[in-house]
Amino acid sequence: MKKRLAFLAMALMMIIPYTGTATAKAESDSYQPKREMRAAWIASVENIDMPPGKNKEEFKDWAANTMSQIENQNFNSAVFQVKPAGDALYPSDIEPWSSYITGENQGTDPGYDPLQIMLDAAHQRGIELHAWVNPYRLTMPGEELSDLSETNVAVKHSEWVVNYGDQYYLDPGIPETQEYVIKTIEELVNNYNIDAVHMDDYFYPYRIAGEDFPDSDSFDQFGENYEDKEDWRRNNVNTLVDDINTAIKSIDPSVEYGISPFGVWRNDSIDPSGSDTTAAQTNYDDLYADTRQWIKNGSLDYITPQIYWSRDFQPANYTILQKWWENEVDQYSQVHPTNLYIGLADYKVGTDTIDDTWNNPAELTEQIKDNRNHSGVEGQMHFSWSKILQNKLSYMDLVQDEVYYTKALVPEAPWNGEQKPKKPNRIKVEHNNNIYIYDNKEAEKFVVYRFEGNKEGDYSNPENIAGVVYSEGKETHFVDEEAEKDQEYTYGVKSLSSTNIESKDAKKAKTKNHNS
């Protein structure tokens, strides 16, 4: 999915140092935020992070193990790719089964629902699940239209399809394709209790030198109000982004909508308000993704620019781009705030042949520390899960030891609902530190705090978070796996709303552990 290495390395030149400032929020390298997005992308396309061909029980085991590992590494979210290319990793009335789940022909039913299994595995461990979709891509390189299922939209509506390079896409300029994409999102949000819908950087495809995207016919038919085809293309994307957000919120206002665009909006050589970079391709000029306008319109809840470069890489410097995006969100979030997360290049650690900085196992850890030093950055997403597991140069050990050694709650989105929930009705703690939480019907999930001894401690300190659990109805069960035998604890449980707002007060209980 993220096969953009060739594009990121293309013809980048020198930059001018950034002179802006940002407000520091971390007093030291040991600062641990109570709220911070810590997400892992789990890519299904070409089976980057998800193995194919598993039966239901094997897939359930894989999902459970994956989410347990994510939880144990103190991540709090997973971004699971459920619609990689005109297909679905869930039973859909609109799209065929993805070949990436079975390893067989597109349209082959695996006999189970991968998305629901992943969603259950995530929520059972207090992990958010963001459903990651690609709107327009139909094939990957080397694939032909003949490889697609007869129920694929490309087969049913060949008049919507264009060929660009060695791939096929839906033409974003045709209104019916927009309507089709929105219907697929509505189906997802109607049928699954997902926490967010997520899109990445593939709107119009990355530009191929010497080859224009073949949309002249649709421009002639639908672009009558535009003299400039590129402005029309940008409007097509802006309209889709806004309409998807409207569709999501009309079904469930608490479901977030987030996008992870390419890391450079525009170079300042083209636009003085762009970043001090020399990227050969940019969102605005090549992908027709005007990310600034989405922020202005309030069309998304979070944005995660893919700043897949090091702090020493001059043509597209991590620190320069981090500050630029922070300023964008601060300046242009006019309808409601937009949470800013940074997309991190775990896949480059120990493998990049252009920038030697990625041979330093501490580079990613230092980027996270830099994020924490800027009040406008609310966390990060890591690409991707298989690279986290590979742990090249033991870089993830450093992340765990230096920046992710406590748990963290995901950031709030109060503009989607600011009601503060009531605390749980009551809680009960049994001898194995099995905690039973009795719901007040207002909570989406609960955060469990553990304090040693018979007194409450500091609820603002993330070191006291034992874990998060999604509400299971009248009685929710949480097991404190890290509780020590025969240690006396005081537990406090607070409610979290569907927009991650925490209750003011906690319900408390005390116990002396008697693990056997």
Image (cartoon, grey):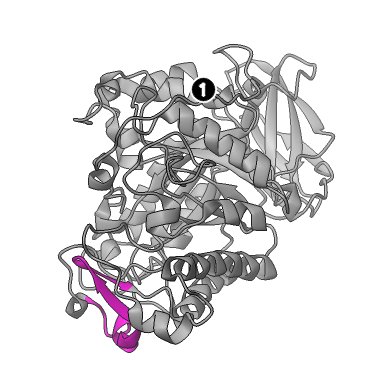
Rendered-image quadrant of the C terminus: top right
Rendered-image quadrant of the N terminus: bottom left
Circle count: 1
Of residues 82 and 154, the one nearer the viewer is: 154
Position of 251 relative to 70 (above/below): below
Residue 479 in view, yes or no: no
**Residue 124 rendering spot, x and y as whole percentages:** 55, 47
Give the magenta-colored segment's residue range: 148-169
Asked whether, in this view, residue 252 is left or right of residue 39, the answer is right
**Residue 453 rendering spot, x and y as whole percentages:** 73, 14
**Residue 150 occupies quadrant:** bottom left
- Residue 158 lies in magenta, yes or no? yes
Residue at image x 69%, y 70%? Answer: 250
**Residue 486 rendering spot, x and y as whole percentages:** 62, 16
Badge 1 is on which residue?
A: 370
Residue 236 in view, yes or no: yes
